[in-house]
Image (cartoon, grey):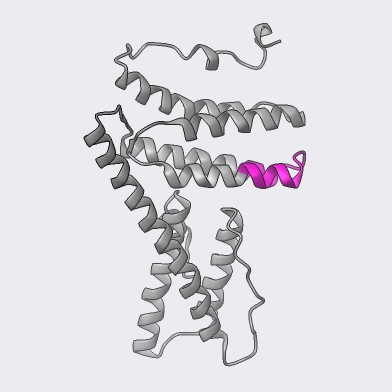
Amino acid sequence: MPIFTTDRLAKIPEDPTQGLLYICRFFSEVDHENHQTQAGEDADYIEFYVLLRAYCKARSYTYQFEELPLNTPHITSFVRNAFARIGEDAKKASQQRVAQSFDQYFSGHFSGTLHFELSEGDVSEIQRLTNELRGRIIQTLILEEKHKQRILKRLEAMQMEIHKRQSNLDQVTGTMCEVLAVIKKAGESAEPWTRIVRNILVIAWASQGRVYELPSSAPMSLLALDDNDPKQG
């Protein structure tokens, strides 16, 4: 039976950095237990390595993964080194995000500037929708590779900067507009891309509406248009 059952895979956080940290920490727990009990098998380490490689590819990380040294006594140390290297990077990225979040919080407090509040549910939903968008971009055949990589990097940067308290939401709105522009230019059908982008922007709009004290029923006129609306030209 695999270590990463369907239930275990479902526990991996939507946020790419947190997901990577979760996998690396779980590996450390299993590796420590195996070391204590001497019960570990090569299959455990192979599974973790293959999972890590697949996850990084799906989340557009650019780590280089060497082939596993099968049929050698070095496979355990090989996998440990890979997790140590990538886990350290993930930990650093997470700490940078925390520092940035506090910087925004205290800068806003002392400068008296406006701040936009996102609930934990808002952040999680944006992360989930963005991951869905990333998956579609990776799978589409109509976009040139250079455009794919540019958009994927922008989405990754956006995900890293999403916090519950934001000084502005320019990263979200700017990235979503670029996604739609690239898709339209490539001739890709606007749906379901528009649906995902619209849902992300709805969350951003609601946060902005609260700051500017707009009524909850205030429409997003630019997003109210669908692909068949003649006013889009």
Marks counted in the figure total 0
Q: Residue at x 65, y 75 (%)?
A: 66
Say if 121 sits above or below 78 in the image: above
x%, y% of residue 89? Answer: 46, 65
Residue nearest the viewer, comparing 97 with 192: 97
Say if 49 sits above or below 134 in the image: below
x%, y% of residue 137? Answer: 65, 42
Question: In this image, 131 relative to 187: left or right?
Answer: left
Evaluate whether residue 192 shows in this view. Answer: no
Say if 47 sits above or below 73 in the image: above
| Residue found farthest to the left | 110
x%, y% of residue 72? Answer: 62, 91
Residue nearest the viewer, comparing 102 with 39: 102
| Residue found farthest to the top | 231
Question: In this image, 138 relative to 41: left or right?
Answer: right
Q: Residue at x 63, y 79 (%)?
A: 68
Task: Please state, as top left, top right, bottom left or bottom right, where the C terminus lies in the image.
Answer: top right
Part of the protein shown in magenta = 135-151
